[in-house]
Image (cartoon, grey):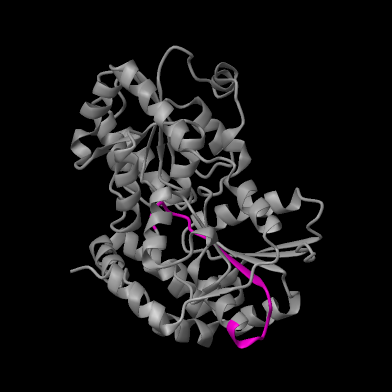
Amino acid sequence: MPTAPRKFLILSASAGTGHLRAADAIAGACRARPEIAEVQNVDALSYTNKLFRDFYSKLYIQLVENAPTFLGWWYETSDEPWKTDRMRFMLDRLNTGRLIKMIRRFEPDVAICTHFLPSEIISHLNATGDIRTRLAIVVTDFDMHAMWLSRSFHHYFVALEETKVHLTMLGLPADRITVSGIPVDPAFARPCDRAALRASFGLRPDLPVLLVSAGALGVGPADHVVRVLNHLQTPAQIIVICGRNEETRARVVSQLQKRPAPPHLSYTVLGYTDQMADWMGVADLLISKPGGLTTAEALARGLPMVVFSPIPGQEERNSDHLLEKGVAIKCNEVTTMAYKIDRLLGDPERLGAMSRAALALARPDAADRIVDTLLATSDLDAFTVGADARETMAEAARKR
């Protein structure tokens, strides 16, 4: 009988916060298993030089804010199997020496990656014999971009059955792909007493609660959203969470000072909060960009979404899935947001159907399923994608 894996290494990257939150959820599930002796949860970028770290984290945020069209173009252009993997691997290898040393010292039995940067490093170390570990790759959006493809791996965990079909059509074995969902903190699935929570937050029990989220980093036009929401005809309580970006919070406050809310609307403006599960628990509607983790958390709460300004690329694809499943409405123009929300709040039957659709799509036990699967398949050898298979995959996925 093979020996059960005892040491788990979880690797993420702080390019945005979603990869880190997914890693935290998996780490929590690992630590709840007595058969796992040691767990390390590491931001891979913390083991790289400052220039490379800033390139990965800050450049992405700057592109989101200032050049989203370019970001979308790059996403689509590079979404072809193996098109950019050698270039990215050379760049990674030049800047991740400390990370590689840490991995070698820890000698994990299982390495779980919630970002494609560390998965490439682990794949290479396995292929060269520098380490011997099982590589699990956890995709943190609904669709899977080609950058997540690894030349050698043990298991993929994806959000949707459709994503698994895509990978099997490319040629990856179905038994190496598990539809787990995106890992979230268990708090988002715990039952909550909405009336008691509303009372604790000073909210009225008889008015709808709209939750506006700018994400943990506070990226997005939250002040523009507030300006438009002032045109709502339906009485409502509006919570605006601005994340760690104090400039975003200041802009929202300034907007409300310049144009005070009408009497039938009330606002609460917050910065970063560690009570997001509770705020989602009291809300009737989430107004947000459709990031992978934010979306998975909302689904676990059965919370319908109003999608606006999705980042071109992965968030646009997330949005497509939410609309197809009946979980969200989308505002192509922020100017129509109040109109569309008024119509939705005036149709409780539709709002209820959207909440049920969210719960049907949710997979709040994703972290547990990932860990249980890896514990149950400890004897798997790596699956290697050879040169001929890579060419076949590239041809199958090529956009014409």
Where's the N terminus, which quadrant? bottom right
- Residue 264 visible (yes or no): no
Left or right: 148 with respect to 175?
left
Q: Residue at x 25, y 19 (%)?
A: 233
Residue 231 location (% of width, % of height): 23, 26
How far from the left and from the top, in percent, is residue 284? 42, 25
Residue 359, horizontal then vertical, whole percent:
47, 32
Q: Report the side of 57 relative to 370 (left or right).
A: left
Give the quadrant of residue 340. Answer: top left
Q: With 9 as the anchor, is 237 left or right in this view? A: left
Q: At 58% from the left edge and 68% from the top edge, which residue is drawn?
A: 154
- Is 110 situated above or below 252? below
Q: Is residue 89 visible?
A: yes
179 or 100: nearer the viewer:
179
The quarter of the picture where residue 163 lies is bottom left
Left or right: where 357 falls relative to 2: left
Give the answer, above or below, for where 65 lies relative to 84.
above
Which residue range is magenta in the image? 127-143
Q: Inspect the magenta stretch and tell me whether residue 71 lies in it.
A: no
Quarter in which the C terminus is drawn: bottom left
At horizontal 54% and vertical 62% (from top left) the residue drawn is 176
